[in-house]
Amino acid sequence: MMWSEIPAGEAPADQGLSPEVGASCRSAEGPKAPVDVQVSFNSGALRAIVSWMPTEGALTYSVTASSGLLKLKCNTSSASCVVPSLQCGSEYYVSVTAYNDAGSSKPTDAVSLKTIPCAPVNISIEEDEPGHLLVSWSLVNFGHYYVVFVKSDDGLEVHCNTSHTQCHFQSDCGFTYFISVFAYNKAGQSPLGDVFNYTTAPCCPADIRAAVVSGDTLRVTWAPVRGAEMYATRAVGGSGEALCNDTAAACTLSALRCDTRYDITVYSFSEARGSNTSCASKRVATAPCSPEIKNISKEALSVISVHWQSNNEEATYIVTARGEAGLWHCTSSGNSCTLINLPCGSAFSVSAIARSPAGQSLPSYSVPLETGTWELYIMENI
């Protein structure tokens, strides 16, 4: 049998073929793959906008975004599609396939899309030394660099840019700092992670003043400091120590040793951070010890010598004879002095005190003295 080529749509009348026969004999083909695929990333919404040139004969398109075992799809009849719900810190491979009634095209070559990095985790904050904060965190997938924002409770904000995983900041005592860390890459900024707060140790009291109340008591005062909720005052010296706790900016230290140098330190405390252990001490001397009169003797007419015992290192002693006839004084830096011109036939009470740059001692016990006719009645070794 002989076959001849018959143009499509035509048929010899003697064969009785309709024009549709030729058309139905043509092979059906799916559309060609789309071209010029473009992928843009919306970092705020974590979604990708995919677009392409329309393909002749295509009725619908399917976009696939693959990351490992995860696959996201969107279908559309237009030349663009939005792929939502992308994950941070991931790389997706995006391809487009065209469809019509006859079938589908081959997928386009995959386009790589790297999303924004995830928020940094394992954030730690510490004062590596007073006045310095160290903020550190773990590496983030696809994080090219990091920015740390530190805002103090007085409104001042500073930041640090780094490609490493730690930043140093200067800090002040008694402040609360609010700290957030972001990771960045070409796609944008990571989502907001946890905001941390860190309260530094309270400030150390300054302008410490110590006033001598008595030979064994000091009244310590200072100016209130930022961040302190309580104060502890410690005095160390003379092979012993004294402690005093108070919420006020003052403390009374008692049962101290007279004529002794003490190193006094005032520590500040807060519930958030505990104690500031870097506070400096101040050396303060207590008042001299009270002298003890040991002997009173007649040296000559109207002349009386008073002897005492005291262990003060440096002090001046003042002896006073008090009676109805008046007051008589003598002064010495040793351990005796002489009262002169005492009237005869009079009664006196004799006592002594010690003075030093630190203060004045309590008076000694009084010793009675009667001049009479210069027959003295002396109480010795009292």
Image (tube, rainbow, N blue to C red):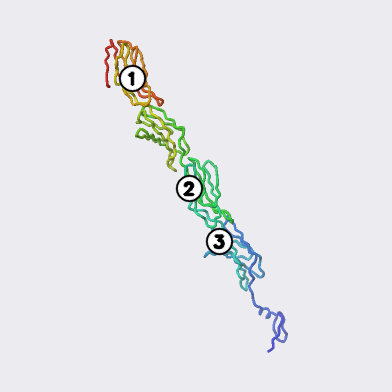
Q: Disc 2 on helix, strand or loop?
A: strand
Q: Residue at x 69, y 88 (%)?
A: 2
Q: Nearer the viewer, residue 20 or 225?
A: 225
Q: Residue at x 46, y 34 (%)?
A: 206
Residue wearing tag 3: 91
State which quarter of the image contains the C terminus.
Answer: top left
Q: Disc 3 on helix, strand or loop?
A: strand
C-alpha separation, residue under disc 2 versus residue under disc 3? 31 Å
Three-letter code for the amino acid on which mark 1 is drawn: Ser
State which quarter of the image contains the N terminus.
Answer: bottom right
Three-letter code for the amino acid on which mark 2 is drawn: Ile
Question: Horizontal placement of 284 versus 162: left or right?
Answer: left
Mark 1 or 3, closer to the camera: 1
| Labels 2 and 1: the sequence-earlier one | 2
Mark 2 or 1, closer to the camera: 1
Q: Residue furthest bottom?
A: 1
Residue wearing tag 1: 336
**Residue 50: x and y, percent?**
61, 62
In this rendering, the count of numbered labels is: 3
**Residue 254: x and y, percent?**
36, 31
**Residue 89: x and y, percent?**
54, 58
